[in-house]
Image (cartoon, helix red, strand yellow):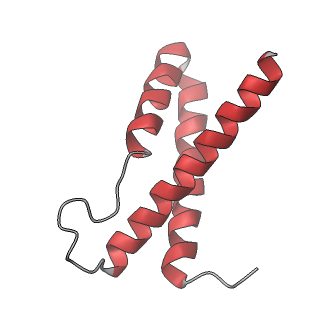
């Protein structure tokens, strides 16, 4: 496996940290906060690459945010797949 660019690594780590904090806060808050957490998770996972201006090169901050969004999407997809498999 190739080494990750610093922006990619930082974005992925940020995604894991934020997901863990949000998940624990939702669990502590109960059913209503769990529902709100899942809604925010779906919304956050829709961050897109350069949709606003495709001619602009992404800056470091954008690259980090994009990496975090990709990581959240990947985690969400894996969680959905596992939930579907366990539900069968």
Q: Quadrant of residue 25?
A: top right
Identify the residue at image location x=44%, y=45%. 45
Identify the residue at image location x=36%, y=80%. 60
Identify the residue at image location x=43%, y=28%. 39
Name the outermost residue toward the front: 55
The image shows residue 11 at horizontal and vertical percentages of: 50, 67
Residue 73 falls left or right of residue 79: left
Residue 63 falls left or right of residue 7: left
**Quarter of the N terminus within the rendering:** bottom right
Vertical placement of 58 versus 86: above or below? below
Residue 61 falls left or right of residue 2: left
Between 22 and 85, the one lying in front of the other is 85
Vertical placement of 82 versus 84: above or below? below
Identify the residue at image location x=68%, y=42%. 78
**Quarter of the C terminus within the rendering:** top right
The image shows residue 74 at horizontal and vertical percentages of: 60, 50
Q: How many marks?
A: 0
Q: Quadrant of residue 83?
A: top right
The image shows residue 16 at horizontal and vertical percentages of: 60, 55
Vertical placement of 22 versus 1: above or below? above
Residue 54 falls left or right of residue 46: left
């Amino acid at each position: 496996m190739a080494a990750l660019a610093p922006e990619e690594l930082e974005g992925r780590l940020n995604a894991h940290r934020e997901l863990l904090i949000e998940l624990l806060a939702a669990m502590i808050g109960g059913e209503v906060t769990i529902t709100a957490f899942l809604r925010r998770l779906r919304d956050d996972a829709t961050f897109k690459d350069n949709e606003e201006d495709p001619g602009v090169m992404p800056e470091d901050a954008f690259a980090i945010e994009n990496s975090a969004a990709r990581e959240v999407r990947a985690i969400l997809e894996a969680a959905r797949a596992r939930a579907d498999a366990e539900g069968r």
